[in-house]
Image (cartoon, rainbow, N blue to C red):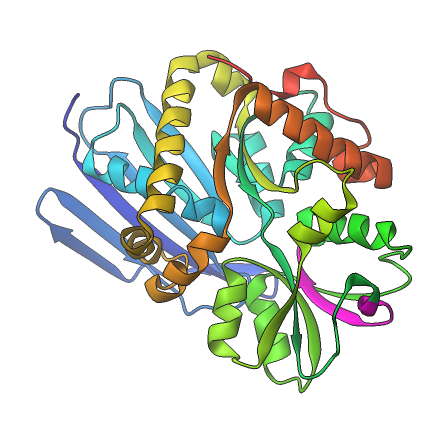
Amino acid sequence: MAQNKYILEVVMKKRILAIMACALLALTACGKTNVKESVSSGESGSEQTTVAQSSENESSLGTIKLGGLKGPTSIGMVKLLDDAKKGSLSYSVTFDMETAPDVMAPKLLNGEVDIATLPVNMGSVLFNKSDGKVVMLDASTLGVLYILEKGDMNIKSIDDLKGKTIVAHGQGATPEYSLGYILSAHGMDINKDVTMDWKSSADEVLAAVENMDSAVVMLPQPFVTVAQTKMPGLQTVLDLTKEWDAIGTGGKLITAGIFVRSDFLESNKQLVDEFLDDYTDSVKWINENVEEASKLVEENDIIKAPVAAKAIPYCNLVSITGDEMKKDAEDYLKTLFDADPKSVGGALPGEEFYYTGK
C-alpha cells in the first residue's frame, strides 16, 4: 500500500448573525505530517472542518470527501480518520465536520462532500427532493436521546411532559420526529401539549439552561454527559430509546446513517465498499477501546477526552449494512411517514435508496 504524506487542516468557523468569519492562526510541522490550524472562539453553532489528504501521490483508490456531524456520528469515524492520517488506508480522506445537519445536507448534494452522516429522515428527504441522488450506506447510530430535568420538575414518565416547555436541538430531524412519535403514542401532540423551545445547537441548549433554576431538556449523547459535567444538578429522567421500544411498533430508533451521492457510488464502488469495511472496523475498535478512542475524539475537536470516555458507552455507535440496514431503516421511516409524511420528504424512498451489497 502506497505511503502517503498527509496534511491535516483544521478550520473553525464562527457564525456571527448570518455572517461567517474564518481566521487562519497557525501552521506547524511535525515529522512527515504537516498540521495547519485555524480557530475562532467557540459560540453556539460553530463549525469545524478537518482535512486529511495526500500531498504527493494519490492513494490507489482515490480520495473520499467525508462529512460528519459534531456528536456521535463523527465519534464513530475517529479511528478511520486516524488511520487515514497515518496512511494506512487504500485511499485518502478529507473530513468536514458541521454542527447542523441542514448545513451538511447541501454539501452532500453539491459535491463538497461525497459521503456524509445525516439523520436518516433527512437522507430520505434529500432522496425525494433530488430525484434519487442520495443513497443510504449504513445505519451508524441508534437511539441516543434523553430527557433531563434541572430542579424538581417531577418528570417520572412521558405523561409528565404534558404542559412543559422542553429546550432542545434538532427541529426537523430525528429529535423532533422521535419525540413527536412517542408523545403521540401517549395521546399527546408535540405542537399542542408541550412547548418546544428549539435551539440551533446542543451548545446553545446548554447556554440557555445554565442560568435557569428549573428546566426540561432533550439532548443526545455525548451532549448529555457534557451537560451533566457542566451542570451537576441536571438529571437524566427519561431514556427516549426505551420509551420508543416500549411502544413496540416503530422498529429500531435510528438516530443517523451514512449517505453517499449516487454518482460517486456508481463511479467508485470499490472505494465505497472499502470505506464501509473500514468504518465498521472503526466503530468496533472505538466500542472496544474507549479510553484510547476518547483521545482521538478530543484530537478531532468533538468533545474533551474525559467526557468522551464517559459518553461513548452510551452513544449506541453501530455499523449496520446490507439487508439488515434496509429493513431497520424502512421500519423507522414508515413510522415517521405514518406520523407526518413531510418528515421523510412526502414519500417513502424506493429500493434504490438502499445500498445493500458489494
Q: Identify which residue is drawn at 55% across, 61% down.
A: 45
Q: Is residue 228 above or below residue 52?
A: below
Taking the image as shown, residue 34 lies to the left or right of residue 254, namely: left
Q: In which quarter of the image is the N terminus?
A: top left
Which residue is nearer to you in this view: 140 or 237? Answer: 237
Image x and y of residue 54, in percent = 23, 32
* Residue 243 visible in rendering: yes
Count of all numbered marks drawn on residues in the image = 0
Image x and y of residue 155, in percent = 74, 72
Q: Is residue 310 magenta?
A: no
Taking the image as shown, residue 218 lies to the left or right of residue 231, namely: right
Which residue is nearer to you in this view: 139 or 126? Answer: 139
Image x and y of residue 252, in percent = 66, 38
* Residue 345 visible in rendering: no
Taking the image as shown, residue 67 lies to the left or right of residue 172, namely: left
Image x and y of residue 242, in percent = 67, 52
Q: In this view, does 263 lie above or below 250?
A: above
Q: Identify which residue is drawn at 63% across, 77% down.
A: 209
The magenta stretch is 160-170
Q: Identify which residue is drawn at 81% across, 35% down.
A: 337
Taking the image as shown, residue 245 lies to the left or right of residue 135, namely: right
Quarter of the view holding residue 346? top right
Which residue is nearer to you in this view: 34 or 254? Answer: 254
Q: Is residue 262 above or below residue 297?
A: above
